[in-house]
Amino acid sequence: MKNLYDLIIIGTGPAGMAAAVTARNFGLSTLVVDEQRDLGGQIYHSLENARPENTFALGTDYFYGESLIRSFRKSGAEYLPETMVWNLDENHNIGILREGKAYQLKTKHLLIAAGAMERPVPIPGWTLPGVMGAAAADILFKVNDMVPEEPVVLAGSGPLFLLVACRLIDNGVKIAAMVDTTRFGSYLKSLPYFPQALRVASYLGKGLSMRWKIQKGDFPIFQSADNLAIYGADSAEEIHFTSLGRKRKIHAKSFLLHDGVVPNIQFTRLLECEHQWYERQRYWKPVLDDWGNTSVNGVSVAGDCGGIWGAKAAEHAGRLAAIDIVYKQGGLSAEEKILAADPLIKKLGREKLIRPFLDQLFPPSCHALVPSSDETLVCRCEEITAGQIREAVSLGAISPGQVKSYTRCGMGPCQSRMCGLPLAEIIADSRQVPTPTVGHLKIRPPLKPITIGQLADLELLK
Amino acid sequence: MSNQTGLDAIIIGGGLQGCSVAIHLAHQNKRVVLLEKDTCGKHASGATAGGLRCLNRAPEEIPLSLAAKTMWGEIEKLVDSNCGFRPTDQIRIAGTQEDLNLLEARRERVCAMGYNHEELIGAEELRRLVPAIGSNGIGGLICRGDGYADPGLTCQAFQVKALRLGVTIHQQTKVLALEKGSEDWIVSTQNKQFSAPIIVNCAGAWGDEIAAMVGDHVDLKKEALAMMVTSRYRHFIDPVIGHASRKLSFKQMENGTLVIGGALRGILLEKEERTLIDWPQMRESAETVRSVFPFLADLHIVRAWGGIEGMTPDRLPIIDSGKHASGVFHAFGFSAHGYQLVPIVGKVVTDLICSGRSDFDLEAFRIDRFEKEISS
């Protein structure tokens, strides 16, 4: 580790790796940190260790990451796996924790490529053992070759939801039911974006083939499902929902929920970068220029943590961000920058064509935004329910910060990663105002806990 | 722009002091509007570590602080909530003989003034009260019945009580100008005007800006105060712990979390009204905690935060009527130890407004005390 880097990158997904390769091509001293043991981010998680017998189940999109990983390995970027970032500030100090020791480093430029996270789905029973995110279950398969206990119910919607369903089918996992929460109205609303999506027909083809595979599966599919709730004594036993006006109940051992992914904005929020509300998918994302620069000087973002565009778009965005950083540090002239960026801008534009269609087709479901039942847990760390949040609002709290101070909602170690979005939605719903106007919770460092001893031994690399 | 009239008083600042004044005024049947530029309790009130101490107060503050202590003991009467108040004692620990000498000198000074709420204890009594201290403490100065409360619950309780008593609270309403009309003050905000004969300035770290609007000038300095909280730990300590010679304020809350503070400074970004944590300074604090309680080394720090507080040159608050215009009252600049004084400040200011006098000697808290120093 050095005292000062030209560039520090957080994350080894497609955006982080691509940016590192580009930055190294122009000779920037580059450090890449990632919390995980294996590189690849979520999409190419553990690709280097994938077992040959899983090649079919993992699919060609997964193995597409191989060449990028190879270039990254050869790039000469310093790479620290299993390294947690616990602090960032606008003076470009970065607190990391590695092998139990805390350090504070400095960088000329910071690139955040922290990816996406599954949208929390706060329905009754979502915290019971046996319930997990569909994408989280997928990671378990990629890393540990593990599949959820059978039979499995899949409940939710979205492209990743379909992908996970297909992977389970290919693995021969017994599926009890697929509970599809996509609304019929969404199909209509997405139609205007269909012509544009047709220009990237490969994505549509992929979607259709996934649909076809699911349709052929030997399990029931419930359309337009709503009012999801999971019940069980010690662990999840059954899911209740309504589908096409009928009440349903399905028994299973595992319940995989999914309601799309949202940008991981913990880092940009901690830095208090300017953010904007994306109404169609109801999430916050940092305000970025064409090169991924945030409102904070010397801090850029690439990939899904700047807005959900997918893995291939992330790769192009990572390269573009790196080109701009190289330019700012004098490694490229203005003309060279434009020439180098041009093909990437075109590719990125093409990758983005499909997204408006998908965002319309798979909006977050109502139950994932505002839990209808007062008993539903919203903050898992501090065990705060929707009812307690509503009560705080009725007492006069108008912002997430005030509700946090009244109820402890969001005060736990997860730093409101899970409850932040539903908290704001519930407050806005109770106050009958638009969600972005109620604001958001402030993220307090450390982003992830460090111990008193680790802080006492903090090493400042100056 | 609409103008709300028919009011008795307008309070500027929705921190705890402002809410306390609102409650006491409402009890006197005053029609009160409270204006808060952000949300109630957003700055110092919400960010405090929550310690309640008479221990080690500036001599001038002791009478107010003792009166406040009594009021905290029955805080439920005032705001219908116990605010998480725990009367668990506060102790300043001595680690060395020099520390002990410092504490003894302090005790003598307070005694000479006729107060006996601070008491010296030896190693044995310290170990009885704080078994975990082991051999790291050889004595201490204690104020029994001091303690702490939950700042979140307190902010909530004071705001809710004010609302229940009929106070109108406008949050996210910043005062842009103050003007004296023929009789009333006219307060302009971004979307509305308010008129009343009385203005109460409880604007905390922004108190100087409001004071300047009515001709009173104070050299108030904004500072960021920082603290941190750990994950839950088994119950092991009751009293709030300070240290005779090291920067430390340390308490275990009812839920098991430890709050660590003690005059730690954060980095203030004044224009943006934000604070940053200065980790090298927090490191010192972690070192202190570890040296006093080594078994806490593996406990996780979950969160650190800062709050913006207004500091006066002599670190004493300003509690006074305006010197350049009638109908103006100030209560701000509590210099990072106003939390304990909250219940009494509301009463004192209300007395000043309603009867023109207070039971307490407020000479040390005059707003023009710094001007005098310059002229003399």
Image: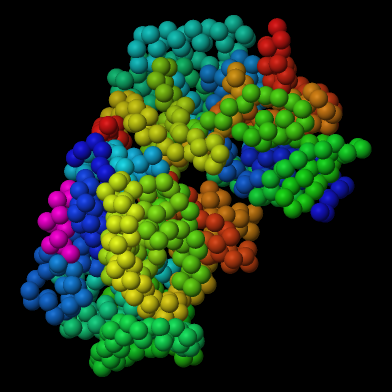
Give the x, y percent position of residue A263. Answer: 38, 63
Residue drawn at x 32%, y 91% is: A220
Quarter of the image where one finds residue A15: bottom left
Residue drawn at x 40%, y 65% is: A307
In the drawing, does residue A65 fall left or right of residue A278?
A: left
Residue A422 appears in view: no
Q: Quadrant of the C terminus of chain A?
A: top left
Give the x, y percent position of residue B310. Answer: 59, 30
Give the x, y percent position of residue B345. Answer: 69, 30
A77 inside magenta stretch:
yes
Residue drawn at x 63%, y 67% is: A432
Residue drawn at x 61%, y 23% is: B312
Quarter of the image where one finds residue B80: top right
In this view, the residue in front, A328 or A252, is A328
Give the x, y percent position of residue B193. Answer: 80, 48
In this view, the residue in front, B142 or A343, is A343
In this view, the residue in front, A280 or B307, is A280
Quarter of the image where one finds residue A231: bottom left
Q: Is residue A370 above or below residue B254?
A: below
Q: Quadrant of the N terminus of chain A?
A: top left
Q: Is residue A399 above or below residue A250?
A: above
Span shown in magenta: A68-79
